Amino acid sequence: MGFLLTKMLAVFGDRDHKVIVVGLDNAGKTTILYQFLTKEAVHTSPTIGSNVEEITVRKTNFLVWDIGGQESLRAGWLSYYCNTEIVIMVVDSTDRERLTLTKEELHQMLSHEDLQKAAVLVLANKQDVKGSMTATEISQCLTLDSITTHSWHVQACCALTGEGLPASLDWMTSQVVAH
Ligand code: G3D
């Protein structure tokens, strides 16, 4: 029966996989979410509360929550953690000053019990801006190599053009298919 169900899900598609998009304010979270949906850059305003959208990639459904990143909202991130399969941490690659803060937020999140099974995708956004940090620099600053408890991946991207985002969706799909 289990085998049959697995086969049917493979044919007809799966349940929704919960994804949360986090990162400091202005990192590009909302732009990325709408780029996933429309493949066009949209005019955004700071996220107050959250946006949620469904994205389907080759029969895999992701329910993607964009959570506001302003300081006053970050304390509320944990109310979204339950059942999250993928955490997307969006980084503004031009914002060197606040990368330490991002690092602290990321490692604190990953120690939360509700995220023990979540995979982590770090998006090094705004690669179109001259002088922005590379994905490798960001990976080093965030000490991603020290993360052994979670599956993780870092991807350079530009939310305005969508560059790097298809590869991100492929990685996300590989993670949920693998589990
Ligand atoms: P947030 O949801 O993380 O707070 P937004 O961030 O998606 O609202 O984006 C914040 C600002 O960064 C927006 O500019 C948006 O257009 C810009 N932005 C997002 N991604 C990129 C990118 O890849 N490259 C560049 N150059 N800019 C980007 P405004 O001017 O509307 O505040």
Image (cartoon, rainbow, N blue to C red):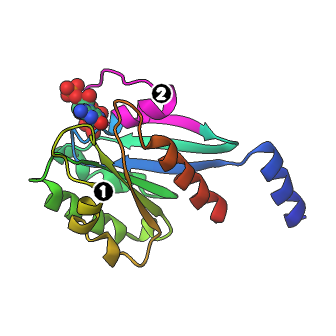
Measured in 3D between alpha carbons, the distance from the residue under mark 1 to the one under mark 2, in whole angstroms, is: 22 Å
User: Any mark on residue 75, and which?
Assistant: none
Amino acid type of the residue that numbered disc 2 sits on in the rendered structure: Lys
27 lies above or below 2? above
Mark 1 Cβ inside 8 Å of ligand 1:
no
14 lies above or below 30? below
35 lies above or below 156? above
10 Å neighbourhood of mark 2: few (<14), some, or many (≥20)?
Answer: some
Which residue is tagged 1?
135
Of residues 75 and 107, the one nearer the viewer is 107
Residue found at the very far top of the displayed protein: 43
Would residue 151 appear left or right of 122 to someone viewing this image? right
Q: Earlier in the sequence, mark 1 or mark 2?
A: 2
Q: Quadrant of the N terminus?
A: bottom right
Whether residue 50 can be seen here: no
Residue 120 position within the rendered picture, expressed as x and y whole percent measured from the top left? 42, 61
In the image, the segment drawn in magenta is: 31-55
Contact between marks 1 and 2 (CB within 8 A): the answer is no
Which residue is tagged 2?
39
Whether residue 116 can be seen here: yes
